[in-house]
Image (cartoon, rainbow, N blue to C red):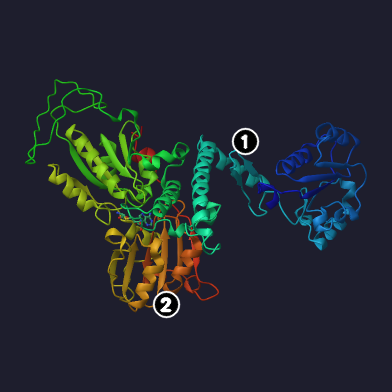
Amino acid sequence: MIPLITANVGQEVSLVIGTGSSIDKLGLVKNRVRTLLSSGGNVVVVNASFQEHWKQLEQEFAGIAEVRMLYRDFQLPDLTTLGRSVVSRVVDRVFVNLPLEQDPQLKHIYNQCVKMRIPINTFHRPEFSTFNMIPTYVDPKGSGLQIAVTTCGQGYLLANRIKREIVSHLPANISDVVINMGKLKDHIINEDMKVLIKEKYMETDLSKPTLGYGLDEDGWESHKFNRLIHEFDMTEREQREKRVRWLSQVMEYYPLTKLADITMQDLEGHSIKATKSSSEPKSTLPVEKPSTDGSTDQHIDKKVKIDVGTICKKNQRGTISLVGSGPGSLSMLTLGALNEIKTADVILTDKLVPQTVLDIIPKDTETFTARKFPGNAERAQEELLQKGLEYLAQGKKVVRLKQGDPYIFGRGGEEFNFFSNHGYEPAVLPGISSALAATVVSKIPATQRAVADQVLICTGTGRKGALPQVPEYVSTRTTVFLMALHRVDTLVKVLLEKSWDPEVLVAVVERASCPDQRITRTKLKYLTSVVEEIGSRPPGLLVIGNATGVLLPEKSVTFNESCKYHIDEGYRAFELDTDYLIPKLS
Ligand code: SAH
């Protein structure tokens, strides 16, 4: 039932006809009246089923201006005389809960409601209802969070049970998360809107705000959020854009529970944060410096008891590995990566590393996250590398966990060089790249006899954000573009100029292998408008080529002006027996 889940039904009038078939069951009607009142509406109750009901309703609602009680039987004209004057007195919705003996009346009420287009809900009688009640969770702490579940008529109780399950799985601090994010959003929008109104609206077209969002972030043009922002020499406007994009990326990528503590200062602050309080060495033991020629001192003094939690494993040389975490699902993590994660002293990560993988890091392992956001990626990267060196100098086992495969657009090569040049050559463990997992989860065989005999992985974002040289079109090739969705308009333009086939099939694969995976299929010529319409759910990539449709029925990959795209939501994960695979999870 839509009106009950909206925050505000304004002055709308709900008519409650009858108060149930049993003298001791007034709870339902009372609840309904309370809910309607809490969403800001007016309620008229008519035709109480029992004298006792009147008494009880009086006790609770007498004196409340928004509740009217009519101590009489219901009459059909009530439907068109008790409502608001702006809608010619027609009531806005009707709830019926009549005793059995009044059943014959039900049909008339229902027919009249249908005729007058008044939504009607009859208790336990779907055949006399035009809308169903939706069990709705309203955050009692008043954060504004509401969760409504519907099974579309398959059962109110079931929907209610599912709602309870969902609610029980929410993090304990969900109210704080909602409140904090709302506060930051308001702060950013209010500040920027003031400037925008002053600077822009006064001079130019009011209908074209240029910051990429409206008053509600649902209206933000999310497909633009990943656009490149210059890191240095930012204009004032770019600085403001940076904050909006920062917030959007924080909301998309950060662990949900952490969102309660993010502050505006974090935007300006450090790019690396310890997630464990003992991040700084407490001991005064001398810190070992790596030798400049890369030689190592393997001697370990076994008599010295070393407190790994605080500082260096004396005389032990630090080690580093670059480890791929796969695209998202834990089932795509390699055993080698699992071993590295479980045996690390320190893990260096960034926001792209999937939460499922971060969740298996033992609790007492120090974890540092590079806060790479538009506008500070270089600084964050530099800081992360320096942290890595510090820990290596303390003799620790450092694991640099990288999303997907470390060497596919992950700056893995640069990191390898950096640490090697400082005397610590990393061991490198490949991971399943999103480029190749995304095709699999989207039912795209990247190579397929007679359709595609080659695969190309490339980027839509070159150095300093420029569009890199795009490849020529090969009809038997599957081309995967990473980091391209934020600038799909430019990319498509260039591809078409380079004679790519406008009819070739494209899959936009977002959050591949994550529970909220989304696959959108379309044709190259529709891609720009489709991405604009659906917004973005980062991270995502593009797969272009004729292999995109080969495993799917013809009708689900047939697109035209009236049906430009098709969306598949969700990822059916492999069930993992983590008790068996990861027995020592702490
Ligand atoms: N080394 C990573 C890629 C890092 S570049 C790998 O091998 O997967 C980051 C880009 O990877 C994103 O912009 C996006 O295009 C892509 N990407 C990463 N994870 C993804 C996922 N789960 N689903 C779809 N695309 C993803």
Residue 572 percent location from the top left of the image: 45, 54
The mark found on residue 409 in the picture is none
Residue 414 percent location from the top left of the image: 20, 51
| Front-lying residue, 258 or 427 | 258
In the rendered image, the vertical position of residue 581 relative to residue 504, given as above or below: above
Q: Label 2 vs label 1: CA separation?
A: 51 Å
**Label 2 vs 1, first from the N-terminus:** 1
Q: Amino acid at mark 2?
A: Glu
- 92 vs 477, left or right, is right
In the picture, the quarter occupied by the C terminus is: top left
Q: Residue at x 74, y 44 (%)?
A: 36
The mark found on residue 140 in the picture is 1
- 206 vs 104, left or right, is left
Residues marked 2 and 1 touching at CB (< 8 Å)? no
Residue 472 percent location from the top left of the image: 29, 75
Q: Residue at x 75, y 57 (%)?
A: 130
Of the two numbered discs 2 and 1 in the rendering, the one whose residue sits closer to the viewer: 1
- State whether residue 187 appears in this view: yes
In the rendered image, the vertical position of residue 351 relative to residue 396, given as above or below: below
Q: Residue at x 15, y 21 (%)?
A: 304
- State whether residue 500 appears in this view: no
The verdict on label 1 being within 8 Å of ligand 1 is no
Asked which secondary structure carries label 1, the reply is loop
The mark found on residue 503 in the picture is 2
Residue 483 percent location from the top left of the image: 35, 59
Asked which secondary structure carries label 2, the reply is loop
Q: Amino acid at mark 1?
A: Pro
| Front-lying residue, 493 or 200 | 200
| Quadrant location, ligand no. 1 | bottom left
| Front-lying residue, 16 or 221 | 221
| Front-lying residue, 586 or 577 | 586
